[in-house]
Image (spheres, rainbow, N blue to C red):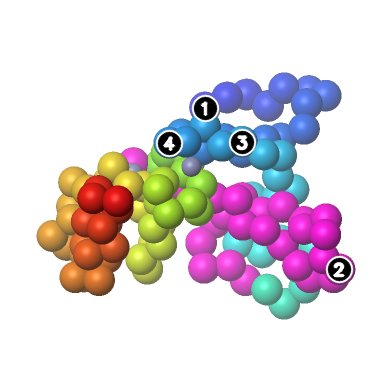
Amino acid sequence: MDAEKEGKRRSFECSSCQFSSPYDYFGKRPGFLKSIVLLEEAYVMKDPFTPENRHLTLGGHCSECNKPVCVGKDCSIFYTRRFCIDCVMENLEEFPKEVQQELNKKDKG
Ligand SMILES: [Zn+2]
Ligand SMILES: [Zn+2]
């Protein structure tokens, strides 16, 4: 785990695609979003382009291996919990058919 460096804005970095972005909040209840509770502990950024209560979910941690992964389809899926693609592939038979098909499509694509 990286120690937070002083004077540097916190930033989220996907361990899969190297996407990185500063974030405003990590957790389930961003203080700047009233009455919104997220489904997972996620990295959240205030959306600078839309007014009030809009946000962007950047990513979260894989519930299996705990790697930080972005919400991009190539990096993770959310199926009751968040899983990185590596963990999905390792446990593919435990996911429903629609998830398997989605991932198989990608391999051929
Ligand atoms: Zn990613
Ligand atoms: Zn994982």
Q: Residue at x 68, y 73 (%)?
A: 36
Q: Residue at x 54, y 50 (%)?
A: 59
**In the picture, residue 11 is in which quadrant?**
top right
Q: Badge 4 local density, few (<14 within 10 Å), some, or many (20+)?
A: some
Q: Which residue is mark 4?
A: 16
Give the residue type at disc 2.
Pro
- In space, the residues marked 3 and 4 are separated at their CA atoms by 11 Å
Give the residue type at disc 3.
Ser
* Residue contact at pointers 2 and 1, CB within 8 angstroms: no
Q: Which residue is mark 3?
A: 20
Labels in figure, total:
4
- Outermost front residue: 109
The reply, left or right, for residue 71 in relation to residue 56 is left
Secondary structure found at label 1: loop
Give the residue type at disc 4.
Ser
Q: Position of residue 71 (x, y in %)?
A: 50, 53
* Residue contact at pointers 3 and 1, CB within 8 angstroms: no
Q: Which residue is mark 2?
A: 51
Q: Is residue 35 visible?
A: yes
